[in-house]
Amino acid sequence: MCNSSSITEFLLLAFANTQELQLLHFALFLGIYLAALLGNGLILTAIACDHRLHTPMYFFLLNLALLDIGCISTTVPKAMANALWNTRAISYQGCAAQVFFLVFLFSSEYFLLTVMAYDRYVAICQPLHYGSLLGSRACAQMAAAAWGSGFLNAVLHTANTFSLPLCCGNTLKQFFCEIPQILKLSCSDSYLRESQLTTATAFLLLGCFVFIALSYVQIFRAVLRIPSQQGRHKAFSTCLPHLAVVSLFLSTIIFAHLKPPSISSLSLDLVLAFLYFVVPPVANPFIYSMRNKEIKVAMWKVMTGCFS
């Protein structure tokens, strides 16, 4: 048995065995990364520069874009570097940092999506109280709570994971460092603390899911009571992007972690990890911009430099 202190680096999963395919994966990841930076960067700039978008909904969307940039920047650049230089190594400290930032940003994004569901609930079900319930101070506090909860969650999981003794071996069957893969290297009776912490976190995330679901039940009931078809369409259009982002976010995670062991495989795990860590940061800007005329206009102004 080896202690984790004797490990100086981990070996990540290689996408291919040949240099040509490695370079192809590098080009693919580079394109995806640039698309994510461009899409989220345009949303950040549009919201920051257009005073008409200085509302609670767009304030939370700005935070979501920041989290998406951080999340994809935690995994993809290292994967690109490994593919370009034909290596698999990541240092022990680098692996710990990657785990911390992934848990931090991923948890914060989920908590933020929960806050955004509350924003849509108040906007549609209690429109007369929208200004008082979601003032600038309340929005800042809710966003800070989402970031702070993610940070605390990341500190607990990272400290717990990297304090465990690891059995001999440092090969991770994933293209980035993630807690389940690291736990597979720990001794069979040494990961109970992390399992307990993961269970507690799962209940917290389940509570957020129930809150989001109940919010949308109330939203749909309120929308269906709107007499005009145009009013119903307008109300639905403000919710659909958030609902699509939540659905994409949750469906991949739920399937990745709750899929039957009989269908588990290395290639499937790799595809699922790609779907829930890489695809959402790229897709979210397009989901929000496709259904939102104000965002499309503001982004067009950013690209053409026509701000007055």
Image: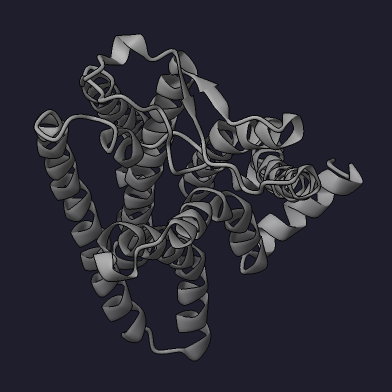
Picture coordinates of residue 198, whole percent (x, y)? 18, 40
Note whether 224 is above or below 116 in the view shown.
Answer: below
Note whether 52 is above or below 125 in the view shown.
Answer: above
Picture coordinates of residue 132, whole percent (x, y)? 32, 44
| Image side of residue 198 versus residue 274, left or right | left
The reply to whether residue 69 is visible in this rendering is yes
Picture coordinates of residue 168, whole percent (x, y)? 30, 24
> Who's the residue at 63% across and 53% down the image?
282
- The quadrant holding residue 45 is top right
Q: Assign the C terminus to one quadrant of the image.
A: top right
| Image side of residue 24 versus residue 103, left or right | right
Q: How many marks?
A: 0
- Residues 153 and 55: in front is 153
- Residues 102 and 9: in front is 9
| Image side of residue 41 versus residue 281, left or right | right
Picture coordinates of residue 307, whole percent (x, y)? 83, 42
